[in-house]
């Protein structure tokens, strides 16, 4: 696996000018180049962290068994039960696939999947995955940094957010035929541009060294390890760089339960359950679930806390 | 839940009580299978949650069926009155298993977390209320309790209606989105409850 290791871009390379501008806007009260420089240092630090990850991220947990990763997940396009994606995704034929990059970028382009793989390669990233439903896994993804793709697209001045759109194929996805009893389709997600440019943010094209199976978001999906799993939009068809905060599916469904940020945070409960701890899938027994305390930013605080300095994480949950 | 043996009933080799017990034991099979599979590791990646959810659904269904017994007899002419008590007890048994899997297995009996859960999460509060009613009904369904309660037994067991309504709420809001299944079950439950409300005198018109 990891036949090709994408070289880590230097922070200065992956940090477009607009990123600094957006950060200034975000951090109320403080303006100036000093701050912008501080911001780029944070990214540089995180980049080092990721470089370590490629050869063994400080993730002491052992990976969740492959069969659990591919047979227990949420992908409402196929159904609401966690076994549904594996069971009901057979009709979904992802290939051929292309991803359209547009919006506030200098180089809009529709990428064929093969070209993305050729251009950006794949590396392995062992990431924690914390579902908003208070269970978690440790997953060896294969993919490349979203930053690399965004850099190729070259965000314009004024770009502040990235919007993602998933596939809409009711004929192949039974969950999209459920009318009222579902989300609005297609599934949409979004990140702030600085979050999207963060070196930890991954476009995954494989898991466990194999191409992504249909149930896990084939052929290309987002992985943002410090956020709840639902931010990781699957089967991405379009990535649009914009100047305003894009709508996100779960937030549209229940704004008081799912925020735009959705950062993993044990101190901010979901209105219907506690987020203080999580069930470890693949461990424990029938009569004793394995649980562990949930970590702020899912244990990636060192790398990403800087992105949210000065923000009230209770308000911007 | 007393049963009046119907004269029309076909003769059976087994006494009524034996038949009640057999029905009860037979419908414990799904639970036994889940637990056996869970212990064998063939119940999927999250066997605990599979049991929790399966048992919740069975509790709901048995409660629904036990409430449908009387309307079935009145409006359809199918008399399974003999089995009303074991059906009600099955509802309680599955509810108890469901609660056990939440309180003990999933929550590790952590009273602090449980108190937080039950006091702040309406869907759980409705679950607890349903369970308390089912427990009260189960514990007053022995012959002795029925005799001791006398005329009070019947109004007490009308609480089953309330349990059904609470269970519908608990089921409907248990998930992150609206699900089809609780919606269908709630519609059926409302029909069953409505049929039970039909006054006796209206029966002949039906
Ligand atoms: C102390 C009482 C109870 C507690 C703590 C409790 C807890 C729960 C929990 C945690 C869930 C899972 C929700 C989720 O995964 O999002 C659930 C689901 C459910 N519960 Fe309960 N419950 C209780 C009583 C009951 C009773 C008495 C019934 C039925 C008569 C019932 C029927 C259900 C059903 C049908 C589901 C949905 C299962 C599914 O379709 O997946 N619950 N309950």
Image (cartoon, coloured by chain):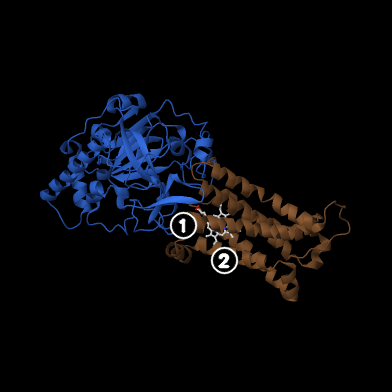
Chain colours: A blue, B brown
Q: CA distance from mark 2 to mark 1?
A: 19 Å
| B165 vs B109, nearest the viewer | B109
Of labels 2 and 1, the one closer to you: 1
Can I make out residue A78 in this image?
no
Please, which chain is the residue tagged with disc 1 on?
Answer: B
Task: State the image coordinates of residue B100 (x, y, percent, origin top left).
Answer: 54, 57
Q: Secondary structure at mark 1?
A: loop
Answer with the quarter of the image where residue A211 lies: top left
Q: What count of labels does the image hold? A: 2
Mark positioned earlier in the residue sequence (2 or 1): 1
Residue appearing at x 11%, y 48% in the figure: A33
**Disc 2 element:** helix
**Residue A253 placement, left or right of B200:** left
Local crowd at mark 2 within 10 Å, few (<14), some, or many (≥20)? some
- The residue nearer to you, when weighing A229 against A92, is A229
Same chain for marks 2 and 1?
yes
- In front: A89, or A239? A89
Q: Quadrant of the N terminus of chain A?
A: top left
Kindly identify which residue carries mark 1. B107
Q: Between B198 and A159, which is closer to the camera in this rendering?
A: B198
> Label 2: chain?
B
Residue where numbered disc 2 is placed: B129
In which quadrant will I find the C terminus of chain A? bottom left
């Amino acid at each position: 696996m990891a036949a090709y290791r994408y070289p880590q871009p230097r922070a200065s390379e992956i940090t477009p000018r607009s990123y600094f501008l957006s950060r200034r806007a975000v951090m109320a009260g403080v303006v100036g180049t000093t701050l912008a420089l501080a911001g780029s240092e944070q990214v540089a630090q995180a980049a080092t962290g990721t470089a370590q990850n490629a050869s063994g991220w400080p993730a002491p947990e052992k990976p969740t068994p492959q069969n659990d990763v591919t047979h227990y997940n949420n992908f409402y396009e196929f159904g609401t039960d966690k076994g549904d994606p594996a069971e009901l995704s057979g009709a979904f034929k992802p290939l051929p696939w292309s991803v359209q990059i547009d919006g506030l970028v200098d180089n809009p382009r529709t990428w064929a999947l093969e070209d993305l793989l050729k251009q950006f390669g794949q590396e392995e990233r062992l990431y924690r995955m914390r579902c908003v439903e208070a269970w978690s896994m440790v997953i060896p993804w294969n993919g490349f940094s979203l930053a690399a793709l965004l850099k190729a697209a070259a965000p314009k001045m004024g770009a502040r957010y990235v919007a993602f759109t998933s596939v809409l194929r009711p004929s192949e996805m039974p969950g999209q035929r459920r009318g009222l009893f579902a989300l609005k389709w297609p599934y949409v997600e979004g990140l702030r541009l600085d979050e999207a440019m963060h070196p930890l943010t991954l476009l995954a094209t494989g898991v466990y060294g194999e191409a992504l199976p249909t149930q896990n978001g084939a052929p290309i999906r987002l992985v943002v390890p410090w956020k709840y799993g639902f931010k990781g939009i699957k089967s991405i068809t379009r990535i649009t760089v914009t100047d305003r905060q894009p709508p996100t599916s779960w937030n549209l469904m229940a704004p008081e339960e799912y925020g735009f940020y959705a950062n993993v945070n044990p101190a901010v409960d979901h209105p219907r359950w506690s987020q203080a701890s999580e069930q470890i899938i693949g461990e424990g027994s029938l009569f004793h679930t394995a649980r562990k305390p949930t970590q702020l930013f899912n244990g990636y605080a060192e790398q990403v806390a800087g992105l949210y300095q000065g923000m009230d994480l209770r308000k911007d949950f | 839940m007393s049963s009046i043996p119907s004269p029309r009933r076909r003769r059976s080799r087994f006494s009524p009580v034996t038949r009640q017990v057999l029905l009860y034991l037979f419908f414990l099979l799904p639970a036994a299978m889940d637990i056996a599979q869970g212990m064998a590791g063939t119940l999927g990646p999250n066997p605990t949650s599979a049991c929790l959810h399966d048992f919740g659904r069975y509790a709901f269904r048995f409660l629904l069926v036990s409430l449908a017994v009387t309307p079935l007899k009145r409006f359809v002419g199918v008399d399974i009155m003999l089995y009303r008590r074991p059906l009600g007890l099955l509802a309680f048994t599955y509810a108890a298993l469901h609660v056990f899997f939440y309180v003990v297995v999933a929550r590790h009996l952590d009273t602090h977390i449980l108190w937080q859960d039950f006091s702040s999460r309406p869907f759980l509060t409705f679950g607890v209320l349903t369970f308390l009613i089912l427990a009260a009904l189960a514990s007053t369904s022995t012959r002795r309790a029925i005799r001791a309660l006398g005329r009070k037994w019947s109004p007490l067991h009308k609480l089953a209606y309330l349990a059904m309504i609470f269970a519908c709420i608990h089921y409907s809001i248990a998930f992150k989105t609206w699900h089809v299944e609780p919606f269908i079950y709630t519609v059926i439950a409302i029909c069953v409850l409505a049929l039970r409300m039909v006054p006796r005198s209206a029966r002949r018109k039906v």
